[in-house]
């Protein structure tokens, strides 16, 4: 890609007026508009969205519209292909020495590492540096740490082919960016953000479990697991909300400056109950809410030392995480692994974290790759919304009957959010924005003037909430998994909340802004109903045994949907467990109630039959399964059932 005449003029202008540009009063916004934007236009990027792409598919997102509180901000530019982030650019004014000052590089590396991007750029036009952002950023890193390319504006003409061959839009489309990232991947210091964060929260679990068991001797094993999970989930939610500008930055860190940390943390939790209306913070019984309030965690005793370590590790410089840019699916992958272990209490009431038996038998937890989730969602939810209006789409019911950490429901939610936004933009967005309860709003202009009046439309938080409550449902036997699914979905609802307040010049009433997902995401055994006890002539079970079975009646729990014929789409990744390794009483129930069961079967096959029974006629069904049901004789009945269905499977 040859260097354009305009870029040659920009380089000449910069050199001729260098002294003025190096002055402290020459602002970052000026250098971006006058020099950095043209640089990336020359690399083939539609920096100002002159092609009028929908928000989800813009080449460049100017993240300065997302700059948050004093303690955190988002990267200046996010460069994307088809809506997928490829790299970040951190811009600085020329008076900053990028070659020597470690701070700009560390900012870029934190953003990019947290977003799991391989490469990133820091530039003030005078200097241009590329970093390998797979190397975990650490306090004390030099500006040169992880830097793999550096040049000045005077070398642009000489180095242009090299730069354009990696970061040019056409080069990225041809795969050169990915190829370069692979060939430059360092062997030392690399640690993926999901692996690092998993290690972090596993440490928190161990720390809290041991401390809670020691300080609260009456806690049962079940209550201990609940308390540890809830405290971690609440802290993560609030910390992410801080980086999104919804909560005051540093409020959790401020607790560590004095004694009695946990009682003061509980005060924040109680304020969050009033603010968000989420089951994550639910401490008082309320009318029309079926879920029981949490009467346990606020009365617990937790040592200051444990909480000081956890809360202190969430903030820069100790923390390498930029929570504003961590993708939701990465948190899902972390939690899939996290949920593979459980806390046990010894005879002496000491906590010990162990792998779940079913996970041990399966050889570990295998997370669902995002591209597979996206494919199944496109093939199931995609046809359901094609040619429809938002009014028609609000009637769709999408289910994951083994939702785990919520990967499929989150994927479906993101798909529906994109679909609604594109529909409103294509159907005269200004008209939609003037409605009494508008589903979209136009963002305020940023430093480039990109924003108000330029077609930068976003869904309102109220619209995100409406879509979630109308369309998405999930069930899992593990109560911790249910809470993680809710957490992931709630965080997705809140994305852009702070931006909406600024753009619409409103002080939005955040009281009860989040939905209560108790009617959408439920805890229970998708395969076993309450007839389990009567059918098998079992003696009266104690409470612990009943809780473990966790019987779930679909016609009762989702009465309206089941009375209407079932769900429009059933998707997911059910557990793959040989039925020989299950409780014999449960296996007997499966043989009594499922027509496709054979002596040599896997639990995924039972889930397939259940899923088919929950899908309405003409609906869509999409599961991840092994290919054994296609060839093995023990799955003949299942194959026959699938072939006879009046639905479409993927």
Image (cartoon, rainbow, N blue to C red):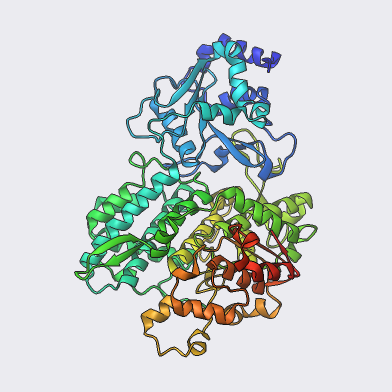
Depth order, front residue of 303/218: 218
Q: Residue at x 47, y 27 (%)?
A: 131
Residue 613: % across, % down: 66, 74
On the rendered image, what quadrant is the C terminus found in? bottom right
Residue 516: % across, % down: 53, 69
Q: Can residue 473 be spotted in the picture?
A: no
Depth order, front residue of 81/514: 81
On the rendered image, what quadrant is the N terminus found in? top right
| Quadrant of res 50 | top right
Depth order, front residue of 418/72: 418
Q: Is residue 85 above or below residue 547?
A: above
Residue 205: % across, % down: 33, 57
Q: Residue at x 22, y 65 (%)?
A: 350
Q: Is residue 448 above or below residue 505?
A: above
Quick one: which residue is furthest to the left in this view? 348
Number of labelled discs? 0
Residue 545: % across, % down: 39, 80
Quick one: which residue is furthest to the front in this view? 633
Q: Is residue 146 left or right of residue 374?
A: left
Depth order, front residue of 206/107: 206
Q: Can residue 556 be spotted in the picture?
A: yes
Q: Residue at x 32, y 54 (%)?
A: 204
| Quadrant of res 139 | top left
Q: Residue at x 67, y 22 (%)?
A: 42
Q: Is residue 454 above or below residue 41?
A: below
């Amino acid at each position: 890609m040859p260097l354009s005449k305009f870029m040659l003029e920009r380089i000449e202008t910069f050199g001729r007026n260098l002294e003025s540009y190096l002055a402290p009063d020459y602002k970052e916004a000026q250098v971006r508009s006058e020099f950095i934007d043209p640089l990336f236009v020359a690399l083939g990027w539609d920096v100002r969205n002159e092609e009028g792409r929908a928000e989800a598919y813009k080449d460049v997102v100017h993240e300065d519209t997302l700059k948050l509180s004093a303690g955190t901000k988002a990267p200046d530019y996010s460069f994307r292909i088809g809506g997928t982030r490829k790299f970040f650019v951190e811009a600085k004014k020329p008076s900053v020495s990028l070659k020597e000052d470690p701070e700009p590089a560390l900012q870029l590396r934190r953003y990019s590492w947290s977003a799991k991007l391989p490469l990133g750029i820091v530039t003030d036009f005078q200097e241009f540096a590329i970093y390998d952002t797979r190397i975990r950023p650490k306090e004390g890193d030099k500006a040169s740490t992880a830097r793999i390319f550096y040049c000045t504006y005077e070398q642009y003409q000489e180095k242009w082919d090299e730069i354009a061959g990696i970061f040019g839009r056409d080069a990225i489309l041809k795969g050169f960016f990915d190829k370069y990232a692979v060939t430059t991947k360092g062997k030392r210091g690399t640690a993926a953000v999901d692996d690092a964060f998993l290690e972090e929260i596993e440490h928190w679990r161990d720390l809290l479990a041991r401390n809670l068991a020691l300080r609260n001797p009456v806690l049962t094993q079940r209550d201990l697991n609940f308390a540890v999970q809830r405290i971690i989930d609440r802290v993560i939610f609030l910390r992410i909300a801080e980086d999104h500008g919804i909560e005051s930055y540093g409020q959790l860190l401020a607790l560590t400056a004095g004694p009695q940390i946990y009682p003061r943390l509980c005060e924040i939790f109680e304020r969050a109950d009033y603010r968000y209306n989420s089951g994550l913070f639910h401490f008082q019984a309320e009318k029309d809410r079926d879920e029981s309030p949490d009467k346990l965690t606020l009365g617990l005793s937790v040592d200051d030392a444990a909480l000081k370590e956890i809360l202190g590790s969430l903030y820069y410089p100790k923390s390498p995480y930029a929570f504003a840019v961590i993708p939701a699916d990465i948190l899902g992958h972390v939690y899939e692994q996290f949920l593979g272990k459980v806390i046990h209490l010894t005879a002496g009431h000491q906590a010990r974290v162990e792998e779940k038996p079913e996970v041990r038998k399966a050889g570990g937890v295998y997370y669902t790759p995002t591209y597979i989730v996206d494919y199944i969602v496109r093939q199931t939810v995609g046809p359901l919304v094609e040619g429809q209006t938002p009014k028609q789409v609000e009637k769709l019911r999408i289910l994951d009957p083994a939702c785990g950490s919520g990967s499929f429901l989150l994927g479906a939610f993101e798909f529906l959010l994109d679909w609604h936004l594109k529909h409103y933009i294509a159907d005269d967005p200004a008209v939609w924005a003037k409605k009494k309860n508008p589903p979209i709003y136009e963002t305020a202009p940023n430093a480039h003037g990109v924003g108000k009046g330029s077609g930068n439309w976003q869904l309102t938080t109220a619209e995100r909430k409406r879509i979630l409550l109308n369309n998405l449902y999930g069930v899992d036997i593990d109560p911790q998994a249910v809470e993680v699914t809710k957490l992931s979905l709630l965080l997705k609802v809140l994305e852009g909340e702070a931006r909406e307040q600024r753009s619409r010049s409103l002080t939005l009433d955040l009281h009860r802004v989040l939905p209560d997902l108790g009617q959408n995401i439920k805890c229970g055994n998708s395969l076993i109903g309450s007839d389990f006890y009567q059918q098998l002539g079992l003696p009266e079970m104690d409470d612990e045994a009943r809780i473990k079975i966790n019987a779930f009646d679909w016609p009762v729990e989702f009465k309206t949907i089941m009375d209407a014929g079932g769900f429009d789409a059933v998707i997911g990744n059910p557990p793959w467990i040989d039925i020989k390794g299950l409780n014999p009483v449960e296996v007997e129930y499966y043989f009594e109630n499922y027509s496709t069961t054979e002596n040599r079967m896997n639990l995924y096959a039972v889930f397939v039959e259940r899923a088919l029974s929950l899908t309405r006629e003409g609906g869509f069904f999409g599961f991840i399964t092994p290919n054994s049901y296609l060839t093995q004789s023990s799955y003949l009945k299942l194959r026959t059932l699938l072939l006879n269905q009046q639905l479409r499977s993927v």
